[in-house]
Image (tube, grey):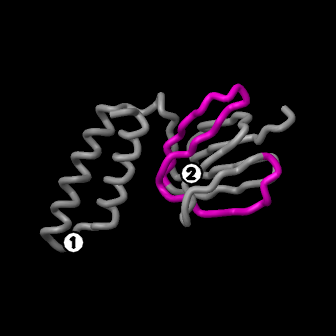
Amino acid sequence: MAGSIRLEVVTPERSVVSADAQMVVAPGIQGEFGVLVGHTPFLTTLKTGIVRYTDSGGQEHFVFVSGGFAEALPDKVTILAESAEISDEIDLTRAKAALERARKRLEEANRQEGIDRHRAKAALERAMFRISLKGG
């Protein structure tokens, strides 16, 4: 399709998105970045967040990603994520339970040594993004 970018979002387990897009916006480690057709090639690290893309019909789609890398080329964006889910795949009940577990773990980490605070904060962040994407 002329005038479009091929978007591929993959994890170690599966292909999550393979679609033509007018525009892709992703959470780069140094801030959000957007890619249109003809973009200058670059590679960047991703942080946990939401990838947004507009399909060839003008409809916006959202994908949760947890870390990874993005490669932008003039006609393609490849996202290699540690984990990724399209919004329809997110189980809101499970995401809310994960949020509560992460909050408790973070409280424990604040009170006692030996609990990985960084991992607890990362779990909390993942749960919050997943809930916000699902509209909870």
Q: Amino acid at mark 1?
A: Gly
From the viewer's perspective, is residue 91 above or below residue 113? above
Q: Is residue 40 magenta?
A: yes
Q: Residue at x 79, y 38 (%)?
A: 4
Q: Is residue 6 magenta?
A: no
Q: Which residue is mark 2?
A: 81
Q: Is residue 96 left or right of residue 24?
A: left
Q: Residue furthest top?
A: 57
Q: What percent of the width, then of the height, locates residue 8? A: 68, 42
Q: What percent of the width, then of the height, locates residue 95? A: 33, 39
- What's the mark number on residue 72? none
- What's the mark number on residue 114? 1
Q: Residue furthest right?
A: 2
Residue 39, quarter of the rendered image = bottom right
Q: Is residue 86 left or right of residue 40?
A: left
Between 70 and 116, the residue placed more toward the observer is 70
Q: Secondary structure at mark 2?
A: strand
Neighbour class for label 2 at 10 Å: few (<14), some, many (≥20)? many
Q: Nearer the viewer, mark 1 or mark 2?
A: 2
Q: What percent of the width, then of the height, locates residue 83? A: 50, 47
Q: What percent of the width, then of the height, locates residue 12? A: 58, 48
Q: Main secondary structure of the magenta part?
A: strand
Q: Residue at x 18, y 54 (%)?
A: 104
Between 123 and 72, the residue placed more toward the observer is 72
From the viewer's perspective, is residue 110 above or below residue 80? below
In the image, the segment drawn in magenta is 37-66
- Calculate the distance from the C-alpha at mark 1 to the C-alpha at mark 2: 29 Å
Q: Residue at x 33, y 66 (%)?
A: 118
The first of marks 1 and 2 along the sequence is: 2
Q: Amino acid at mark 2?
A: Ala
